Image (cartoon, rainbow, N blue to C red):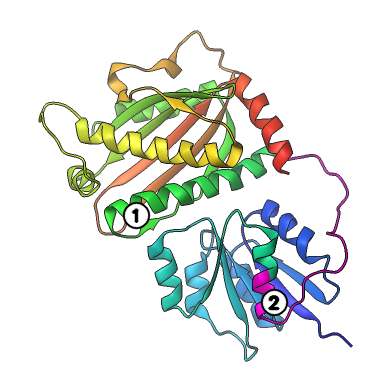
Amino acid sequence: MLHNYNILICDDSPFVHRTMARYLCSIDNVVLHYALNGKEGLECLRHNDIDILFLDLTMPVMDGYTLLESLPVSEHDTNVVILSADVQQQAISRCEALGVEHFMAKPFEPSELFENLSRFGVTSPIRPLATFPCVETNYIEVFREVANVALGRGAAIISDHLGEFITMPLPIVATTEASSLAMTLNEIRDNEHAVAISQRFVGGGIYGEALVRLHGKDISAFGQRLGFSQVDEHTNEIVIDIANLMVSSFLGALTEHMNIPFSVRQPIVLEEYMHWSDSTKSAATEYFTIEYGYRAESLDLDCDVLFLMDNSSTSVIKKIMETLH
């Protein structure tokens, strides 16, 4: 009689749950459990003998690091595999310090998943991969996971340059009406303690603009550690360079994941130009938006990024996400 393996997928993305289930349900002796955050994960670990835990690091309510710090919660021996878009070396080192030895970066190949399973005695499936009834694709849900992967690549680039850990954000992906967006943009523009940069981009029928807002006393120090220098004290060279890095690192990862090359224009200080506040836009017009923020632990610096894409871009994004579903 085959031994049943209890496997817990602890990730805030239902898209990841479905993807993992597609592969794991093809194995006869696997019982799947799901959690959307670390708190739910700990409860599952307390009440079930979980053999393998696939753990995301960036989740709401309780992140993966906090869950790891809380282990063990039972006498059962649970093997942990980090399954995360956060590919910073600093993140891997932190997990290793908490006793984790196995890592999978999103997105992953099925062969990598089955290789990790085989380490713990779970054999590769002999049946075809599981199929599920067709459901309407939630393109925002799928894109949120794509954005999460892109943010992880961006954080790794910034962390490598900076030499320290970058707190991974949870991306907010949504459609936003122009009236609500106008309030957000006015708040950005009117904040005298922050500097905002605007940068247009285009690729594959997607047209948009990225707004980067920097706030904190360590902006110059952050820029210098990234290799940027200030020549003219009356300009915002460092701020513009930082903003360009934030935008290009994100779009570069999107290019790899979506197979769409993006081109960007030269970033400029927001006060000099504000395309999206055009009063001729209808208040009911919707934009596709991505919002996130990076934080460096030892510096007084907030870096918030808002990507805006017009209505015609949304239909392109939907079609691409359907191919990834």
Identify the residue at image location x=54%, y=41%: 256
Crowdedness near tag 2: few (<14), some (14–19) or many (≥20) residues, C-alpha within 10 Å:
few
Q: CA distance from mark 2 to mark 1?
A: 32 Å
Q: Where does residue 146 sit, x and y in percent of width and height?
A: 59, 44
Q: Considering depth in this image, is 9 or 88 the residue closer to the camera? A: 88
Q: Secondary structure at mark 2?
A: helix
Q: Secondary structure at mark 1?
A: helix
- Mark 1 — residue? 159
Q: Where does residue 116 sit, x and y in percent of width and height?
A: 64, 72
Residue 30 against residue 86 in the figure, above or below: below
Identify the residue at image location x=70%, y=60%: 110
Q: Which residues are magenta?
A: 115-137
Residue 87 appears anywhere in the view: yes
Does the magenta stretch mainly form a helix, a strand or a loop? Answer: loop
Q: Is residue 35 left or right of residue 239?
A: right
State yes or no: discs 2 and 1 in contact (Cβ < 8 Å).
Answer: no
- Mark 2 — residue? 118
Q: Quadrant of the C terminus?
A: top right
Looking at the picture, which amino acid does disc 1 mark? Ser
Identify the residue at image location x=58%, y=42%: 257
Q: Considering depth in this image, is 250 or 292 the residue closer to the camera? A: 250
Q: Quadrant of the N terminus?
A: bottom right
Q: Which mark is residue 31?
A: none
Q: Is residue 93 magenta?
A: no
Q: Is residue 157 left or right of residue 75?
A: left
Q: Quadrant of residue 186?
A: top left
